[in-house]
Amino acid sequence: MLKQQLFKNVISGESQRCYLSKGAIIGAGQVGMACAYSMLIQNTFDELVLTDINKLKLEGEVMDLMHGLPFVEPTQVKAGTFEDCQGADIVIITAGAKQRPGETRLDLVQRNAQIFQQLIPELVQFCPDAIFVVVSNPVDIMTYLTLKLSGFPPARVIGSGTILDTARFRALLAQKLELDPRNVHAYIIGEHGDSELPIWNRVNVAGMNLRELNPQCGLPGDPDQLDDLFQHVKNAGYEIIQRKGATCYAIGLGVTQLVHAILNGQNRIFTVSTYLDGQYGLKDVCLSLPSVLSNQGVVSTINVALSAIELEQLQNSANILKKTASQIQCGLGNHCS
């Protein structure tokens, strides 16, 4: 819960209540620091604590951020331990092994599962009331694992899911249509990975679907047209990793928007990874659907009408994730599903 403090209004002299927000970022790698930088310059938290197993690197990163504080709104930034994260409203988890060139996100499962088995119980001990935002890959499996290990209600365990894929989708569509990406509405759902899928029949600009807007765009399956665009979306992460070793800036911006939606109770829709309990006939799996975020976390998912093919693809995505989750131990004395 947000901390409530009492202040005096300097004009009226009356007492007023002001909420101070605290955030924690677990992992000071490229993604963690992109999140930290984005949140700092967008005045996201009043207090931000960063932790990492590499203490020297952590101290250097925080020093670098602190030297920029005269250029931003007042924020207390510090390097700390899990104990220093006590009282955090939101904990952003970016810790984990790095995806290697040629490696799929699901290939990371065993390495990151072992890290989370130690990490999550400690975080729960010090941050029992926080909302956890999981960014580490494979994010759907790590979100599911975090939910099982934490014992939190599903609303308070959120994966960054396909927010980045959705952003890439909108950006590439906007480039093709020569429009501002903010005016292109489109979603990628399912796994953040190879089995993700676009909802083509819900792509729209100004209330018009894509075919009405631009008959020359083609339809999925047309060579060199929209299906090719989706392949660029799906493979973008691999292409960036091959060129520069990691993706970080766009996800940092995206996670910042998630956090703002939660802190400010915006009821804003994102394609986050969340626990399914019957939606589209799917249960006991975390994957991305358009979901409403507010100060309680995920307050609802949007029941988007899917075609028969899209529903089949979504079920396939869920089956892949459930099979992967069943192959790892989650620290509870049995498999994760």
Image: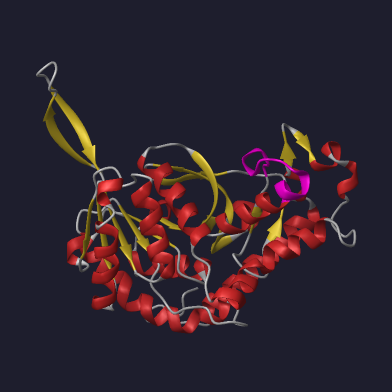
In the shown orientation, is residue 310 left or right of residue 106?
A: right
Q: Is residue 13 visible?
A: yes
| Between 45 and 114, the one nearer to me in the picture | 45
- How are the colours assigned in the image? secondary structure
- Please report the residue visible at 67 percent of the width from the left and 63 percent of the height from the top: 196
Q: Position of residue 310 (x, y in %)?
A: 75, 56
In the shown orientation, is residue 300 left or right of residue 154?
A: right
Location of residue 301 with respect to 278 vertically, above or below: above
Q: Residue furthest top?
A: 12
- Please report the residue visible at 34 percent of the width from the left and 63 percent of the height from the top: 151
Prevalent SS, magenta region: helix
Q: Is residue 294 magenta?
A: no
- Please report the residue visible at 67 percent of the width from the left and 44 percent of the height from the top: 304
Q: Is residue 153 visible?
A: no
Q: Position of residue 130 (x, y in %)?
A: 29, 54
Q: Position of residue 52 (x, y in %)?
A: 29, 73
Q: Quadrant of residue 221?
A: bottom right
Q: Quadrant of residue 31?
A: bottom left
| Between 271 and 299, the one nearer to me in the picture | 271
- Please report the residue visible at 43 percent of the width from the left and 42 percent of the height from the top: 261
Location of residue 97 with respect to 226 vertically, above or below: below
Over which residues does the magenta segment extend? 173-185
Q: Position of residue 4 (x, y in %)?
A: 18, 38
Location of residue 308 with respect to 74 vertically, above or below: below
| Between 168 and 57, the one nearer to me in the picture | 57
- The quadrant of the rendering that contains the N terminus is top left
Q: Is residue 176 magenta?
A: yes
In the shown orientation, is residue 94 left or right of residue 251?
A: left
